């Protein structure tokens, strides 16, 4: 049972008077006490800003940080709330301390030191953040550590006039320290800094099993919730959401799910932290909009990880959307919880300070879907409700049903509250165009459709009325790329009554020379509302146009794929993932194939042209140079949704050879999963991939 927040925090405060364990001896000369730090409400709502790590990597410079500060101002991001400019790791000199024991900035990166840079940031109406680690500096293992110098470093950060401190745990785990103990000591030093300067404390322990290997629960990020709310303004809840220059949607979902485990400990002034926002670092615009939606309802700190100077207008608009930010910055500080079961589609709800609800309809799947919940399910009562779409600003009225047509990897976000006054525009859901058949083959609802030149396909658009009044003459028009044709099937009805759905179907035809890639199908839905005119909604969906199918005896890895994903890096042709070494398993090298990291899916279009595939699968020998942890995967070959080969669980000491009948297969997927123990060290190989077509 979840405990009331104030009771939990009181208990945590009592528990935080701890003894230092034998393997974490008190640092010599550190004046920080082990008593718990008093929590300060320095940021009643989630703080917002930008951080150097994902965009600038290991060598941020004074000039780059000043340029970012300038852009935050000129772009309007500062005025939207992004006020913290955070210098992450690798800012210190190669020998990070002076002979007196003070931290020293790298003079090549910060020739004037950090204080003039902080002054510049402040002069822009911004705040400054800095980075350190809770462990000791260990050359060759971690670049900066404060263990043994907690009070000295806290005093120095205050003297430089920083407003926030991020405290990592890379040195801490290398030294086998107890995070609860050392973070409490650091928090006390930070609160007791000699200048009396208020500074945010971001507790950043990213150590997570199995991603990092096998660590005790008490040393992991997933344990921070049990002590961090009493000492920090925010605390990381899982491992990093990506790598320098790369944040992927699957890891956004992974971190969000981990972050959602303990919503009860979040509240004004202290928040769960799922890591940074990653526009244009590997996600589509739709996927990043989903991350922004999820982070906002999670009451998460909104810290941008990308180089904001290079972002598109679309990304900047997503970051600065007022209605979405208002949900994140709601004064109640409540974190969203899931309503109903977990799955490909989900509903999440966040209670807002004025009694309204922020409702998320999340589509984790690879095809569009119309998702539905009810006002009653999200904790509201009555018979009329106002729905404001936070992303489109469209305001409608519902009789109790909350629905949206949600793209693949998308999320709808509504602010829902009781309706009053004259009736509003009925909430009509204009569906996204969905390909239900290609040729004579049905497309499963959860599968992204694929067409090829010369194909015919059936496209359906559902229109649903969730309002209390009917709408009249609903009509759908479908727009397709130049050279294609779209023909409606059937006639539109004269009206659409409440709680009913109408489906408009079309046949589309692709020319024989349709260019491979992603095409867009756009549906324009309109309808008449008494006294409100004829509202219009435009929705669109992508359709993958496949490259030409293979011909003859080929190596499949040398053929163009439709799409390809890898747990980290990218699928690598004829090399181990990352490209550093040849494909090698059990000491034998293979000249052709694919190197990936779990989880991975590589999709090819065969067009019913191939009959046979032979391959050898297993874990690449490169893992033997990394360590004994991880390195377990499963391999599947899937044709048109049917499993044609399943390797079972393979370790670094196993391989499997497969000879697979491809007769009749149109779309082929090569799938690698993590065997249930995470993706650590899962460098997987598809060797050979000899195909007869």
Image (tube, rainbow, N blue to C red):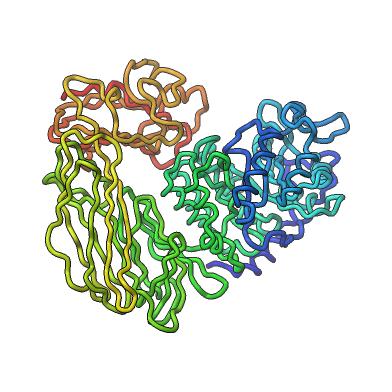
Q: Position of residue 72 (x, y in %)?
A: 63, 47
Q: Is residue 114 left or right of residue 224?
A: right
Depicted 210 relative to depicted 7: above or below: above
Q: Is residue 584 visible?
A: no
Depicted 688 relative to depicted 485: above or below: above
**Residue sitting at 59 percent across and 46 percent down?**
220
Label count reads 0
Q: Position of residue 257 (x, y in %)?
A: 47, 53
Q: Nearer the viewer, residue 676 or 400?
A: 400
**Residue sitting at 17 percent across and 23 percent down?**
551
| Residue most extreme to the bottom | 421
**Residue sitting at 44 percent across and 18 percent down?**
581
Q: Position of residue 345 (x, y in %)?
A: 35, 57
Image quarter for residue 39?
Answer: bottom right
Q: Position of residue 31 (x, y in %)?
A: 85, 46
Q: Is residue 557 left or right of residue 693?
A: right
Q: Nearer the viewer, residue 410 or 38?
A: 410
């Amino acid at each position: 049972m979840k405990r009331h927040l104030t009771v939990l925090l009181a208990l945590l405060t009592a528990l935080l008077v701890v003894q230092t364990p034998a393997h974490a001896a008190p640092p010599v000369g550190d004046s920080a006490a082990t008593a718990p730090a008093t929590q300060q409400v320095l940021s009643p709502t989630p703080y917002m800003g930008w951080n150097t790590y994902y965009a600038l990597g290991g060598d941020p410079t004074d000039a780059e940080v000043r340029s970012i500060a300038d852009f935050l101002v000129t772009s309007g991001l500062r005025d939207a709330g992004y006020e913290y400019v955070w210098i992450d790791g690798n800012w210190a000199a190669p020998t990070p301390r002076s002979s007196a024991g003070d931290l020293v900035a790298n003079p090549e990166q910060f020739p004037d030191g950090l204080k003039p840079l902080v002054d510049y940031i402040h002069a822009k109406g911004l705040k400054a953040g800095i980075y350190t680690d809770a462990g000791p500096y260990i050359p060759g293992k971690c670049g900066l550590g404060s263990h043994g110098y907690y009070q000295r470093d806290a005093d120095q950060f205050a003297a430089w006039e920083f407003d926030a401190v991020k405290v990592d745990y890379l040195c801490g785990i290398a030294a086998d320290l107890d995070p609860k103990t050392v973070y409490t000591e650091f928090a006390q030093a930070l609160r007791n800094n000699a200048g009396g300067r208020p500074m945010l404390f971001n507790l950043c322990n990213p150590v997570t099993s199995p991603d990092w290997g096998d660590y005790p629960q008490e040393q992991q990020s997933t344990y921070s919730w049990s002590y961090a709310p009493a000492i920090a303004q925010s605390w990381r809840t899982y491992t990093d959401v990506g790598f320098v220059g790369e944040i992927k949607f699957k890891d956004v979902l992974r971190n969000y799910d981990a972050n959602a485990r303990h919503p009860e400990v979040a509240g004004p002034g202290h928040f769960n932290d799922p890591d940074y926002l990653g526009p244009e670092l590997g996600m589509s615009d739709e996927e990043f909009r989903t991350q922004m939606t999820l982070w906002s309802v999670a009451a998460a700190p909104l810290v941008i990880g990308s180089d904001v100077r290079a972002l598109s207008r679309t990304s900047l608009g997503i970051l600065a959307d007022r209605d979405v930010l208002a949900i994140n910055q709601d004064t109640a500080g409540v974190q969203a919880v899931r309503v109903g079961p977990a799955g490909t589609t989900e509903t999440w709800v966040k209670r807002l300070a004025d009694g309204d609800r922020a409702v998320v309809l999340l589509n984790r799947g690879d095809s569009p879907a119309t998702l539905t919940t009810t006002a009653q399910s999200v904790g509201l009562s009555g018979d009329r409700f106002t729905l404001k779409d936070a992303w489109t600003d469209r305001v409608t009225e519902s009789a109790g049903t909350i629905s949206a047509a949600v793209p693949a990897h998308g999320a709808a976000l509504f602010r829902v509250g009781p309706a009053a006054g004259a009736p509003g525009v009925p909430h009509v859901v204009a569906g996204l165009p969905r390909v239900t058949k290609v040729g004579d083959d049905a497309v499963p609802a959860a599968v992204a459709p694929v067409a090829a030149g010369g194909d015919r396909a059936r496209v359906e658009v559902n229109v649903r009325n969730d309002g209390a009044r009917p709408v009249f003459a609903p009509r759908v028009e479908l727009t397709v790329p130049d050279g294609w044709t779209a023909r409606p099937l059937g006639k539109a009805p004269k009206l659409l009554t409440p709680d009913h759905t109408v489906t408009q179907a079309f046949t589309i035809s692709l020319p024989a020379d349709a260019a491979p890639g992603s095409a867009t199908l756009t549906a324009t839905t309109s309808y008449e509302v008494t006294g409100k005119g004829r509202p219009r909604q435009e929705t669109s969906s992508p359709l993958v146009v496949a490259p030409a199918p293979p011909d003859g005896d080929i190596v499949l890895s040398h053929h163009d794929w439709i799409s390809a994903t890898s747990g980290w890096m990218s699928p690598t042709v004829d090399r181990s993932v990352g490209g550093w070494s040849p494909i090698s398993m059990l000491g034998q090298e293979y000249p052709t194939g694919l190197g990936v990291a779990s989880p991975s899916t590589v999709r090819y279009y065969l067009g019913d042209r191939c009959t046979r595939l032979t391959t050898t699968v297993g874990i690449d020998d490169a893992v033997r140079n990394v360590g004994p942890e991880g390195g377990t995967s499963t391999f599947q070959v899937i044709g048109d949704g049917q499993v044609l080969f399943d390797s079972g669980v393979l370790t670094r000491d196993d391989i499997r050879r497969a000879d697979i009948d491809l007769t009749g297969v149109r779309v082929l997927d090569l799938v690698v999963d993590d065997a249930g123990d995470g993706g650590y060290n899962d460098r997987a190989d598809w060797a050979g991939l000899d195909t007869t077509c």
